[in-house]
Amino acid sequence: MKIVPCSEGLQLSSLDTQTFKFKYLKVLVITMGKGLRKRDVYIRILKMVAEGKTAPEIRRTLGLSPSNYMFYEKNLIRNGYIVKYNTYPRTYALTSAGKSALENPANLKLSLRMSGGRPKTKTTKTPEISVHDVKVKIPILRKGDPIPPDKETAVRNWTKKYYRIDLPVPVTIEETTKNLILHFHELRYPRDPNAIGMMMGDVMRYTYLIATWLNAKYGWVVDVPNARVILNHIAIEVPEVKEHLRPGTEVVFQDKKARAIDGKELPYPSKAWIDNTPSERNAETWDLDYTEAFLRMPFTVEHIYREQSEFFRLHNELIAQVTRLLARLNEKM
């Protein structure tokens, strides 16, 4: 490649422009994070989480697309290295495993899905329905002793406080001036119509458990009977048609409000969409009606098939009877 020195820097011949772009601009991409090893990207994300940066700030710093960033985020959450504290803007906190991996990168286990490809060994997995985030709002009747917050976020003229509780599922408590908001993450169930009942049962059971714990340990009193679900973000695995789903596709029903898992109406339109993550093609929604309709779909299709089969059977019998009657009329004539 011919490079001619000049006062303004380096000058390339026109024939070598593409070679320069491929070889040298790749270095610039590496500095933006896309050329880093997957392990290094995970460590850099953990460092920025420890610094209190939000998801958009982390993504822009690393130069990742939204779909690629979601791939890294989900791996860290599912493997227990970070927990999500807030949705808008999306913020996190390090778990004990995340702090250990940050202190010693060797503790970042390679069981993480380091690439978007399928595993080499074929395994049969039952499709699941999972909860990305269910928010339960509980009015505070009386505050007790201060709870040491795991994270604080300044919002206008007050400060949001977040607490992490170790239950069988990740739960984050957000304290506002008048309410506690419980964030339930990564609840997982088999993909069948009974999942909704199990999900609601778990959310209510954990809500009562947290209220009892707050009262016994810190003297807080919350109004559990008036607790209500203010968000349910649900994802449904659809491996049967994964290759045919278009990421980013969404359907919004403007004339219908979304319904929460407690049966109450939510203050925003019903919406469903396909996840953008490269390794995922889940159908996601925040409307219980859509979720129930999706889970009942195989049974609905079977019911329609049976009704159609019965219709065709009766139709064929009618044709046969009419044919016989016409034959008898022809014989008499």
Image (cartoon, grey):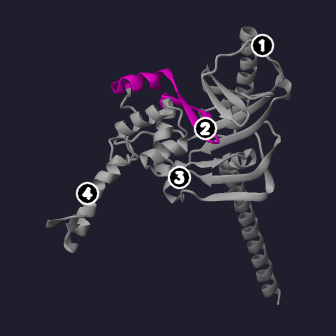
| Mark 2 Cα-neighbour bin, 10 Å: few <14, some 14–19, many ≥20 | many
Earlier-in-chain disc, 4 versus 3: 4
Task: Say whether disc 1 or disc 4 marks the residue closer to the N-terminus.
Answer: 4
Q: Is residue 283 magenta?
A: no
For the residue marked with disc 2, what is the amino acid? Answer: Ser
The Cα–Cα distance between marks 1 and 3, rounded to whole angstroms, is: 43 Å
Question: Which residue is labeled 4 in the image?
Answer: 24
User: Of label 1 and label 2, which has the lower sequence position?
Assistant: 2
Residue named by callout 2: 130
Which quarter shows the N terminus?
A: bottom left
Q: Position of residue 292 (x, y in %)?
A: 72, 45
Residue 149 found in image quarter: top right
- Which of the two marks, 3 or 2, is nearer to us in this view? 3
Q: Earlier in the sequence, mark 1 or mark 3?
A: 1
- Magenta stretch bounds: 79-107
Tally of numbered tags: 4
The x, y position of residue 176, in whole percent, is 75, 29
Gap between marks 4 and 3, in whole Å? 30 Å
- Where is mark 3, residue-wise? 276
Residue at 61% across, 43% down: 235
- Between circles 1 and 3, the one closer to the viewer is 1
Closer-to-camera residue (155/95): 155
**From the viewer's perspective, is 46 left or right of 155?**
left
User: Badge 1 is on which residue?
Assistant: 144
The residue located at (37%, 46%) in the rendering is: 33
Three-letter residue code for mark 4? Tyr
Mark 3: amino acid: Asn
Of badges 2 and 4, the one in the foreground is 4
Earlier in the chain: of badge 3 and badge 2, it is 2
Answer whether residue 88 is visible to the viewer in this image.
yes
Rendering coords of residue 316 (x, y %): 72, 69
Residue neighbourhood size for the residue with mark 1, other residues' Cα within 10 Å, grouped as few (<14), some (14–19), many (≥20): few
